[in-house]
Image (cartoon, rainbow, N blue to C red):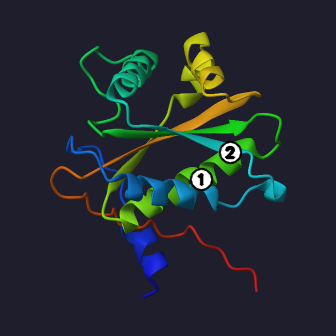
């Protein structure tokens, strides 16, 4: 079977990570895979903020936890040491789809490199706050961006989950 299709079939969302930081070279490859995602009219209007700073990672986790309504001791990033925040230019009509394709590419790339990943929501709500809009300004990012998701990445703690059986009746051919 083609290795790309095999990766698509075997990638799972991971919810238990080791604290060990992946190599920067691995993170660069994952981010680069996101840069090659398809985008509406080829605009490439999606950006990624790579967070390996544990203080900022923990602040993001705390904000995400609060938005999600969980207890303060819950980590919605499941211990992953890296958070890749995907944001898309709101002026583009395809911004949500474009950002979603970036997330998919990065999760597949992480899997291909032997790392786990998971799409964590609530980036939209985080980046609607002044605190995180200010972070973007501090990074020199101009424009109106919406948070699409957090791609949390790290080494898998334990075994990867098995794929659920695929449901029947989801494909219809018109020949």
Residue at 54% in and 21% down: 126
Report helix, strand or loop for mark 2. Answer: strand
Instruction: Tell me, for residue 65, which label it has, or none.
Output: none
Report helix, strand or loop for mark 1. Answer: helix
Left or right position of 3 against 143? left
Residue 75 in view (yes/no): yes
| Quadrant into which the C terminus falls | bottom right
Give the x, y percent position of residue 96: 69, 42
Which sits earlier in the primary sequence, circle 2 or circle 1?
A: 2
Marks 2/1: CA–CA distance: 8 Å
Q: With respect to residue 175, does 31 lie above or below? A: above
Give the x, y percent position of residue 150: 48, 38
Q: With respect to residue 33, does 102 lie above or below? A: above
Residue at 61% in and 21% down: 138
Q: Residues within 10 Å of mark 2 (few under 14, many from 20)?
A: many
Residue position marked by numbered label 2 in the rendering? 46
Instruction: Tell me, for residue 102, which label it has, or none.
Output: 1
């Amino acid at each position: 079977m083609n290795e790309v299709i095999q990766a698509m079939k075997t990638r799972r969302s991971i919810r238990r990570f080791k604290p060990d930081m992946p190599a920067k070279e691995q993170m660069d490859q994952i981010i680069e895979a996101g840069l090659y995602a398809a985008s509406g009219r080829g605009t490439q209007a999606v950006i990624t903020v790579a967070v390996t700073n544990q203080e900022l990672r923990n602040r993001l986790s705390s904000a995400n936890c609060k938005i999600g309504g969980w207890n303060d001791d819950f980590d919605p990033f499941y211990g992953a040491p890296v958070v890749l925040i995907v944001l898309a230019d709101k002026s583009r009509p395809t911004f949500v789809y474009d950002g979603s394709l970036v997330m998919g590419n990065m999760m597949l790339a992480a899997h291909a490199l032997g790392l786990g990943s998971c799409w964590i929501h609530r980036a939209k709500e985080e980046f609607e706050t002044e605190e995180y809009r200010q972070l973007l300004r501090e990074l020199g990012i101009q424009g109106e961006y919406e948070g699409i998701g957090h791609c949390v990445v790290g080494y898998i703690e334990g075994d990867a989950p098995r794929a659920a059986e695929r449901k029947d009746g989801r494909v219809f051919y018109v020949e």
